[in-house]
């Protein structure tokens, strides 16, 4: 009887295997493919996150360097320019993605990589997502990356005195915070490495970064943007990106939210800012950048704050990456960083 059952199981198993081969189906391969599709979809959350990074012609690079000691996510890539004399001024590229998605090796950082053609070294950083750690881990990571760059500048032919940060969306928020929190002890965790180094930066490029999470819904309502475009985000919900990184609905933790607002820390010694935003941004209201620029100008001077509003532009897109617009950005960097 036992042998009969054994033969029966062998026959059934053989028939199942033949059926799989005949149909050209591989269950394991299908699962892998499905997971890849899901990951790709997730990456789309950041502007141009589904496009490839463009490092064509780059000869000198270091990939996946560990800059801190809290997480495997704390990695950065260093690219040196195609020409020029070291040490090179540095652009630190900070990707967006709602603190949920994004990566340092996607097309999101291609505008920053244009710096390689203009004599800048470019350092692209990753940081912990809100799925791994809650605020202020993301700011602590960004600060740790700056300290690492400064501590290892000579090793990688970087100029520790000339470090600009450039981020879009939530990367813009982190870039802006790096600009306004220079010297603020509560804004960094020195146990993450290189505690003797400064995390101050020389200039900030903030592309459509959220500034005050608690005012975004009211600004969208006041502007009437919901009648102009579809899929305008609602932020005062438990499932919003801002609430997820805070660990609770943002309206329940206003004091914690305040620590993520670059306006909280504005002081007279902040570096120059270049801020750019589209009028039809469905994710971050354009008023966020307008109000932030006005607050900066009052303290550090109008001459150190450049605000450009792109009519009919959305949350990123072609308008930001035109040759003429990038020339404006690099004119700003050349003025303050080189």
Image (tube, helix red, strand yellow):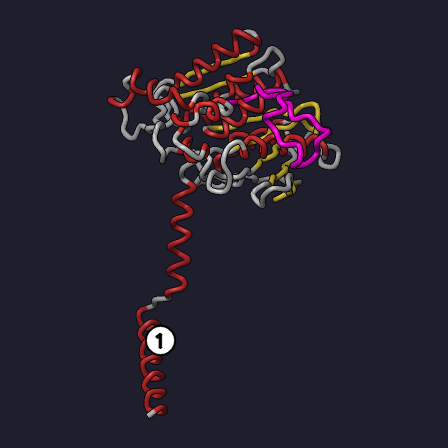
- Is residue 183 in the magenta section? yes
Is residue 316 shown left or right of residue 302?
left
Nearest the camera: 251 or 222?
A: 251
Q: Residue at x 44, y 13 (%)?
A: 291
- Neighbour tally class for label 1: few under 14, some 14-19, many 20 plus, Cα within 10 Å: few
Image position, residue 323 (x, y; %): 49, 24
Image position, residue 193 (x, y; %): 68, 36
Is residue 154 shown left or right of residue 299?
right
User: Which residue of the protein is positioned furthest toward the right in this rendering?
Assistant: 154
* SS category of the residue bearing label 1: helix
Q: Which residue is mark 1?
A: 17
Q: Residue at x 71, y 36 (%)?
A: 156
Is residue 152 shown left or right of residue 117?
right
Q: Could you tell me which quadrant the C terminus lies in?
A: top right
Magenta residues, start to end: 180-206
Image position, residue 270 (x, y; %): 60, 15
């Amino acid at each position: 009887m036992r042998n009969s059952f054994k033969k029966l199981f062998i026959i059934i198993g053989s028939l199942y295997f033949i059926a799989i081969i005949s149909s050209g189906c591989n269950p394991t391969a299908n699962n892998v493919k499905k997971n890849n599709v899901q990951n790709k979809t997730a990456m789309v959350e950041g502007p141009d996150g589904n496009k490839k990074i463009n490092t064509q012609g780059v000869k000198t690079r270091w990939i996946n360097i560990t800059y801190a000691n809290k997480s495997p996510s704390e990695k950065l890539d260093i690219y040196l320019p195609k020409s020029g004399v070291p040490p090179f001024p540095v652009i630190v590229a900070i990707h967006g993605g709602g603190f949920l998605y994004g990566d340092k090796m996607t097309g999101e950082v291609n505008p920053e990589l244009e710096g390689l053609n203009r004599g800048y070294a470019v350092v692209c950083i990753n940081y912990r997502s809100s799925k791994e750690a809650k605020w202020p881990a993301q700011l602590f990571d960004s600060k740790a990356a700056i300290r690492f760059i400064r501590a290892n500048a000579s090793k990688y032919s970087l100029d520790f005195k000339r470090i600009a940060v450039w981020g879009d969306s939530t990367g813009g928020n982190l870039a802006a915070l790096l600009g306004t929190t220079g010297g603020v002890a509560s804004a960094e965790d020195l146990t993450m490495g290189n505690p003797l180094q400064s995390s101050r930066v020389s200039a900030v490029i903030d592309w459509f970064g959220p500034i005050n999470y608690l005012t975004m819904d009211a600004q969208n309502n006041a502007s009437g943007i919901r009648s102009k475009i579809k899929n305008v985000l609602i932020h005062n919900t438990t499932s919003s990106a801002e609430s997820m990184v805070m660990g609770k609905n943002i309206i329940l933790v206003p004091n914690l939210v305040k620590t993520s607002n670059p306006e909280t820390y504005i002081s007279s010694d902040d570096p120059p800012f270049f801020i750019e935003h589209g009028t039809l941004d469905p994710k971050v209201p354009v008023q966020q950048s307008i109000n932030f620029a006005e607050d900066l100008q009052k303290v550090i001077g109008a001459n150190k704050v450049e605000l450009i509003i792109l009519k009919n532009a959305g949350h990123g897109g072609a308008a930001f990456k035109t040759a003429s617009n990038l020339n404006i950005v690099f004119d700003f960097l050349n003025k303050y960083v080189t």
